[in-house]
Amino acid sequence: MRIFIVHIGNFLLDGNSGVAQKTFSQAAEFRNLAVDVEVVAFTARAKIDVNHSFKFTRIDTTHLKDPYAEVLSFFRSKLQPNDAVFFRYPFASKGLMNVTSEFGRQIIFEHNTIEHQEVLLGQMDHFKSMPFSFRPSYIGYFLRTFIFKKTKEDEFGTDILKNAAGGICVTNEIAAYEKKRCGSYKTIAIGNAAPQVGNVDFAMPKFDGALRVVMVLGALHLWHGLDRALKGLEAYRSDDVVIELDLIGIDENQLPAYQRSDSFRVKTLGRMTPQQLDQVIPSYNLAVGSLALHRIGLSEASPLKVRQCMVSGLPVVLGYFDTDVSQSPELSYYVCQFPADESKLDWSRIVRFYKGIAQEQHSREHLIASAISELSMQVKARKAVDFIVSCFGRSDVN
């Protein structure tokens, strides 16, 4: 079996992006399972970022009104009957509908979000940026978006899924959503994998009156819930443990306003490459994951940043249900769980949580071993290949 891993857009052109890191790591593990793999990006951006060491096929769609015409052309010339297409779901459209009408039986989608919800949020933001008008198109757009809450997913999504062979979803919540909108759609939930890390020091970092905490944001989004962490810090008072919170991915001018005190300090470190993250994350005592997914209607996730922190030996603070971590007896032990609501973080509780783990012998070593055994790309890729093969009713992959 040959698998084409296909992306529409610019995700793969930035070799340091989480999507690119995941995709090429996945492709490498597929190859380790004796699968012939080709990674393909259909993109309108010409520039591939410097230091991009991954090999993939770039199909230029710069001057095309409909990039899916180029997708169809590529599939018609390259796909053989036994080939599979692992396609990162790019949101519904007439063009995608045309592709699945012809090649859907060979396509397995990867779903990373509840699509209707995300598209609707995008429509709302787009509408708010438009100047007011009495044009019928403006009024119609308002009604479709804010009153009827309709998107292209309503128009084409169900039929696209009916045409496809199956879908791999990064959470159980997303899998249930896809199944609800198309009962015949074959789905499986496979959470995101942890990035591969270098040599890890099993020794716990020093904890001598300062709790060093990291929060990897990438960019400042509503669902990160940074404000919950900051409000908790404003209320935190301690004479013996100072909280040192480092924020990776944002700059000082992006930091929301907060009231400072002697019990904590907050520092922004800007963006880092995966290699830099690999080096700095193990130096922290603790990591904070997403705290406000409920604001965008989600209760479950499987973030790459949480997985990277856990395979590096960091216990985590979460405000959502994690597809893998929350239901694992081994991993959930290292989670300080908070409710998915607007309450501020109780940092005194977090300090007590960490103190309990820090006094246990070999705790970081146990966490790393458990995280690697449950969250590694090797484990996830095996499950993905097995599902892809099952969609074709075959068993010819070792």
Image (tube, helix red, strand yellow):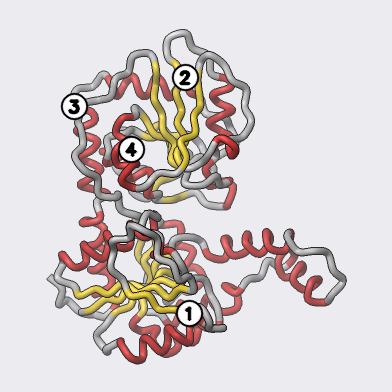
Do labels 4 and 3 touch, CB within 8 Å? no
> What residue type is disc 1 on?
Thr
Q: Which quarter of the figure is the C terminus placed in?
A: bottom left
Q: Is residue 341 above or below residue 388?
A: above
Q: Which residue is mark 3?
A: 362
**Alpha carbon separation for disc pair 1 and 2:** 53 Å
Direction from residue 268 to residue 205 in the image, left or right: left
The percent coordinates of residue 168 (x first, y second) are: 36, 66
Checking the image for residue 218, the label placed there is: none
Checking the image for residue 61, the label placed there is: 1
Observer able to see residue 327: no
Q: Is residue 341 above or below residue 165?
A: above
> Which residue lies at the image location 24% right of the left edge and 73% below the top edge?
37
Residue 36: name its quadrant: bottom left
**Alpha carbon separation for disc pair 3 and 1:** 52 Å
> Which residue lies at the image location 48% right of the left edge and 70% below the top edge?
45
**Alpha carbon separation for disc pair 3 and 2:** 24 Å
Looking at marks 1 and 4 on the same chain, the residue that comes earlier in the sequence is marked by: 1
Looking at marks 1 and 2 on the same chain, the residue that comes earlier in the sequence is marked by: 1
**Alpha carbon separation for disc pair 4 and 2:** 20 Å
Direction from residue 118 to residue 243 in the image, left or right: left
User: Which dot, 3 or 1, sits closer to the camera?
Assistant: 1
Q: Which residue is mark 4?
A: 332
